[in-house]
Image: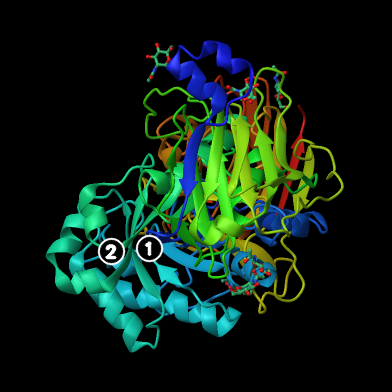
Amino acid sequence: MNIGNQCWVFWGIFLYISVCLGVDYDLDDRTGLGRSFDGIGALSGGGATSRLLVNYAEPYRSQILDYLFKPKFGASLQILKVEIGGDAQTTDGTEPSHMHYEDDENYFRGYEWWLMREAKKRNPNITLIGLPWAFPGWVGNGENWPYSFPDITASYVVSWILGAKQYHDLDIDYVGIWNERHFNNKYIKLLRYTLDKRGLERVKIIASDNLWEPITSVVIADKELQDAVEILGVHYPGTNTVPKALKTGKKLWSSEDYSTFNDNVGGGCWARILNQNYVNGKMTATISWNLVSSYYDDLPFGRDGLMTANEPWSGNYVVESPIWITAHTTQFTEPGWVYLQTVGHFTHGGSYVALTDERGNLTIITETMTHDHSVCIRPPLPPYNVTAQNVTFHLKGTFASVSELQVWHSKFDFKTNKTVLFQNLRPIKVIEGSFSIELDVDEVYTFTTVRNGQRGSYPDPPSSAPFPKSYKDDFDVSGNPYFSEAPNFADQTGVFEYFTNLTDPGPHVSTLRQVVTQRPVTWVADADQTISVIGDYKWHDLMVSCDIYMEAVHTGGVFIAVRVDKGGGVIRSTRGIFFWVYADGTYKVTNDLSGMTVLAEGLSGTRARVWYKLTLTVKGNYASADLNGYPLWKNAVLWEPRHGWVAIGTSSFELAQFDNFAIEALA
Ligand SMILES: *[C@@H]1O[C@H](CO)[C@@H](O)[C@H](O)[C@H]1NC(C)=O
Ligand SMILES: *[C@@H]1O[C@H](CO)[C@@H](O)[C@H](O)[C@H]1NC(C)=O
Ligand SMILES: *[C@@H]1O[C@H](CO)[C@@H](O)[C@H](O)[C@H]1NC(C)=O
Ligand SMILES: *[C@@H]1O[C@H](CO)[C@@H](O)[C@H](O)[C@H]1NC(C)=O
Ligand SMILES: *[C@@H]1O[C@H](CO)[C@@H](O)[C@H](O)[C@H]1NC(C)=O
Ligand SMILES: *[C@@H]1O[C@H](CO)[C@@H](O)[C@H](O)[C@H]1NC(C)=O
């Protein structure tokens, strides 16, 4: 043993000695290698998590994309998974389907196509995955279930993959089944069959984006299914697998993980699971929900992305710690590298992994995250201890001749708050195959033969600013708008997209139109009304106006609203002050989206296919509403909610249009 420091005096206490002198760890490929590494990635969607990103001005939008995708710059992500929009609420909003109706096809809706293209532009090797959360109503033929006609569902999903290639030259590598919901054996086999029939043999299937069971047992029991499924993908596995899953011989992925507030504890969570998903669970890919927090903070799971970019109006964004934690692995590996068998836990807590390529490169990543500084949102993390420790690595086999390693270091210092992220330290000499290092708690190190890692940077973006108090949108976009959705509107039920009526001689040629006409096959409990929110959640006193046009002749209804207090999966119970007019000539003011609490109602004379201007003013405890500039209703007294977003929407799944939207926030 190589002894020679003050720790000698504690020779009698074995544990202390082992801390001081260090414990030895072999990194050796002579007994064979471990599993093949498939990459670290992130998920856009599930749902609408990149909504605000697309409306950033340049150069900020490209900078954000560089921090996420550009190789050797920031997170250098190796996998991008996106939602296959299904017109329904999928956590922080809805994403549009490429087929709202059975006879409709459009591969330019939403922002996921654009995002995939931008990712590919930066990293042509990035792996692309598509997964549905929800489906348009016609796919379920009126039932809230996608498997009644599995052939329809399979060709719907396959058309998305074909459209990606045809319209965007994107090769989708993997497709999933139904996010965190039931799978169906017949459907999976039919999906495989349909892919093959359409020349998409190279597109592999991930199942089932839920728990280890029942998919593992079903795959073991059914040979045909075994052949159809390439990857067992599980969500939030807590770094563990089950023996049965290992026995399948399938690749195991954590196909959704993280979902933790992106402060330094979030960074700690990410560091711990990136290593331990392999060490404990033999999972060879980990995918973060979500990619970038580009949705309003007050929607569910605010800031659970690798970085934050939810202020397109200011240009402000924040490169949070998970970006640099990702870089520790991604900048020094590529999918196709292989884990060594010699990976594991350190004696005094923490873990290490080592990966190699075909040319004898070696990348070692260590993490020593303490329990309280690395708790993820789920599952519960059992207690464990980590202490500072000396470790000695012995490089053997192919790696015995390595003489120097590049060193990258991150440390979350919760005492002094002096966090260091992805710092390039002096290379470490490897002497006769060995090197030692003192690891403190809450640190990540990369030791690697790869020399071209880089901590990318841009000048600081503009400072953070609240949503503008005075805001207007006439939805007039010349030519074909690049995105189908108007900036800053976050659809919570239904889909609102740009519409051009070339036969309209008047001022309403370009409008925003709600286009979902049938309740989708939902993922959560979408409202029975459609609604899109916008603005600052803290707003309380304001005036909102909008021109509206009901298309549904007898049953139509449209609203504008303020102080809208909820979005996401709880959208059904949203409250606020809602001003509705209906095609049957009546109006209503309600205190909730469901229309249960009526504050006022009466005759408005409104009908379908006529444009009207609605104005809603709320100040303190008083609200009033105008129709075409004439007061319909005045100074109603209201108490709750005290603040919230502005919203527009319809009384059912029906076509309706909106134009000349304007907000004046008074406070
Ligand atoms: C690691 O070793 C150094 C010197 O060899 C010693 O000073 C230090 O106390 C040790 N650290 C720990 C955490 O034991
Ligand atoms: C893509 O992969 C190939 C093969 O592994 C590699 O040579 C190339 O450098 C990669 N390109 C990027 C941009 O990572
Ligand atoms: C590691 O890979 C690089 C290419 O990225 C190659 O040039 C180098 O020779 C490799 N290093 C070793 C030790 O094999
Ligand atoms: C962690 O260390 C403390 C103090 O030494 C001890 O009481 C506790 O049992 C340890 N916890 C675990 C999970 O080992
Ligand atoms: C540590 O830094 C964070 C981020 O800058 C800050 O929010 C927090 O208040 C700081 N904590 C202490 C104890 O200084
Ligand atoms: C388009 O404009 C024409 C002329 O104003 C109108 O008759 C028609 O209803 C409009 N179509 C839609 C879908 O709004």
Q: Would you call the spot at circle 1 few (<14 residues within 10 Å), some (14-19), or many (20 or more)?
A: many
Q: Residue 284, image x and y in percent?
A: 42, 56
Left or right relative to 614: residue 284: left
Q: Label 2: few (<14), some or many (≥20) within 10 Å?
A: many
Q: Residue at x 23, y 61 (%)?
A: 248
Q: Give the residue at mark 2.
A: 146
Under tag 2, what secondary structure?
loop
Q: Is residue 626 left or right of residue 11?
A: right
User: What amino acid is found at the position of numbered circle 1 in the picture?
Assistant: Phe
Rendered residue at 57%/61% (across/down): 78
Q: Quadrant of ligand 6?
A: bottom right
Res 183 label = none
Q: Residue at x 56, y 11 (%)?
A: 9
> In the image, is residue 194 above or below residue 605?
below
Is 592 in front, or is 192? 192
Q: Residue furthest left?
A: 221
Q: Residue 520: x percent and y percent?
A: 37, 59
Name which of mark 2 and mark 1 comes first in the sequence. Answer: 1
Q: Position of residue 34 (x, y in %)?
A: 39, 58
On-image quarter of the C terminus: top right
Rendered position, 215 above or below 507:
above
Residue drawn at (51%, 51%), measured in percent from left and top?
Answer: 354
Residue 405 visible in the displayed image? yes
Q: Nearer the viewer, residue 548 or 481?
A: 481
Colouring convention used in this rendered image of the protein: rainbow
Circle 1 is placed at which residue position? 135
Asked if residue 619 is positioned above or below residue 113 in the image, the reply reads: above
Q: Nearer the viewer, residue 645 or 62?
A: 62
Image spot of residue 129 (x, y percent):
47, 66
Mark 1 and mark 2 in contact (Cβ < 8 Å)?
yes
